[in-house]
Amino acid sequence: MGTIKLKNIRTYSYHGCLIEEGKIGSDYSVDLEVKTNLKQSSISDDLNDTVDYVLLNTIVVEEMAIRSNLLEHVAQRIIIRIFEESKAVSAIKLGVSKINPPIGGDVEAVTIEMEESRK
């Protein structure tokens, strides 16, 4: 078993419960870890034997472009798509951060983290 990590995928997205968040948007950061068997690809040196991190990044960017009220909702969509489109992924840990959230205080980011294993 092994882990593939994509750290600090940056997007400008329009998530949030406030009307203004849907209009002006905000900066986001996504951290993704997937568990998969890396043994075969370590031997074969063949992209077809591993999880393509270009695909993982594409899924994150595409799902972050679809507005959601809650970070949990967009995170769940990302998890579902990864399991659907990459059968080699056995588990996912995902963090979605809203940078400088509008919460009336000096807060660098608000982050939700979700973990899920293939059923």
Image (cartoon, grey):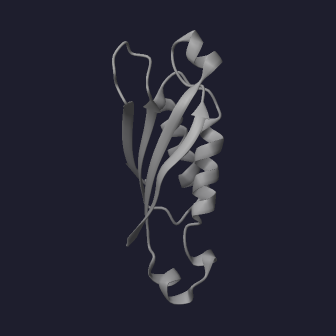
Coordinates of residue 12 in the picture (x, y in percent): 60, 34
31 versus 46 height, above or below: above
Q: Residue at x 58, y 56 (%)?
A: 56
Within the image, what quadrant is residue 109 found in?
top left
54 versus 15 height, above or below: below
Q: Which residue is drawn at 44% across and 81% down?
A: 39
Coordinates of residue 54 in the picture (x, y in percent): 62, 61
Q: Which residue is drawn at 61% across and 39% down?
A: 63
Q: How many labels does the image show?
A: 0
Q: Residue furthest bottom?
A: 43
* Side (left or right) of 86 relative to 37: right
Q: Residue furthest front?
A: 106
Coordinates of residue 81 in the picture (x, y in percent): 58, 48
Q: Which is more toward the observer, 22 or 100? A: 100
Q: Which is more toward the observer, 54 or 34? A: 54
Coordinates of residue 9 in the picture (x, y in percent): 53, 48
56 versus 3 height, above or below: above
Task: Name the image quarter holding the N terminus.
Answer: bottom left
Q: Which residue is drawn at 53% across and 32% down?
A: 27
* Side (left or right) of 78 relative to 97: right
